[in-house]
Image: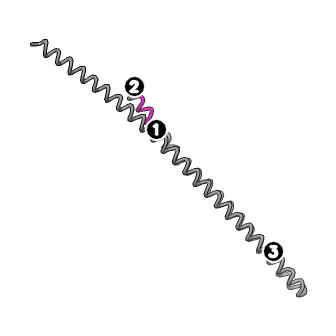
Amino acid sequence: MTTEERLYKLEGIVEGVMATLPDRVSSLEHRMDLLRQEVKAEIAGLRQEMKSQTEGLRQEMKSHTEGLRQEMKSHTEGLRQEMREEIARLDAKIDTLRQEVKAEISGLRQEVKAEISGLRQEVKAEVNTALNRLMLYFTALTAALALLTLFAR
């Protein structure tokens, strides 16, 4: 395989890696956006459910005695606490997903950097080999010219 063919092949590999990296990052960002939308929808649904439950409880409190009002208030507070815990759990899940995405992106960056560094070393070696051969050819040409000059006299 010639140096040009190797350089062409290496160039293709580098272009292939560079072409897939934005797609991977975009894919990760898209998955993160989808997860955010799911979490937002779940929170909105839970909030709507909480609002409807609270409204129902308010109507019921109006029709019952003061004792039932106190009982329902404590029940509502329990639901609010559950909602806070659920929201906190979802926030923690989002943070975990963010960290995973960041770690994956960082890993991809390291892989690309390592691969590019390896390719650079290969290209440098190929170029050095080509230059060494060229110097040998020039040296041989110089020797041949010197011999021709010597015999031509």
| 26 in magenta | no
Q: What's the distance in space between the residues labelled 3 and 1, CA to CA?
A: 59 Å
Residue sitting at 46 percent across and 38 percent down?
A: 118
Q: Residue tagged by mark 3?
A: 78
Residue 114 vs 41, above or below: the answer is: above
Taking the view exactly as shown, the residue that stands out farthest to the left is: 153
Q: What's the distance in space between the residues labelled 2 and 3, CA to CA?
A: 75 Å
Residue 98: x %, y % from top left:
61, 58
**Residue type for callout 1:** Gly
Q: Badge 2: how crowded within 10 Å, few (<14), some, or many (20+)?
A: few
State whether the magenta stretch is mostly helix, strand or loop: helix
Q: Residue tagged by mark 2?
A: 2
Image side of residue 3 versus residue 145, left or right:
right
Residue 44 vs 107, above or below: the answer is: below
Here the colouring is: one colour
Residue 34 vs 132, above or below: the answer is: below
Q: Residue tagged by mark 1?
A: 118
Query: Regarding mark 2 in the picture, which secondary structure is present there?
Result: loop
Which of the pair 60/150 is nearer the observer?
150
Q: What's the distance in space between the residues labelled 1 and 2, CA to CA?
A: 19 Å
**Residue type for callout 2:** Thr
Q: Badge 1: how crowded within 10 Å, few (<14), some, or many (20+)?
A: few
Q: Please identify the quadrant where the N terminus is shown.
A: top left
Residue 41: x %, y % from top left:
69, 64
Which of the pair 24/52 is nearer the observer?
24
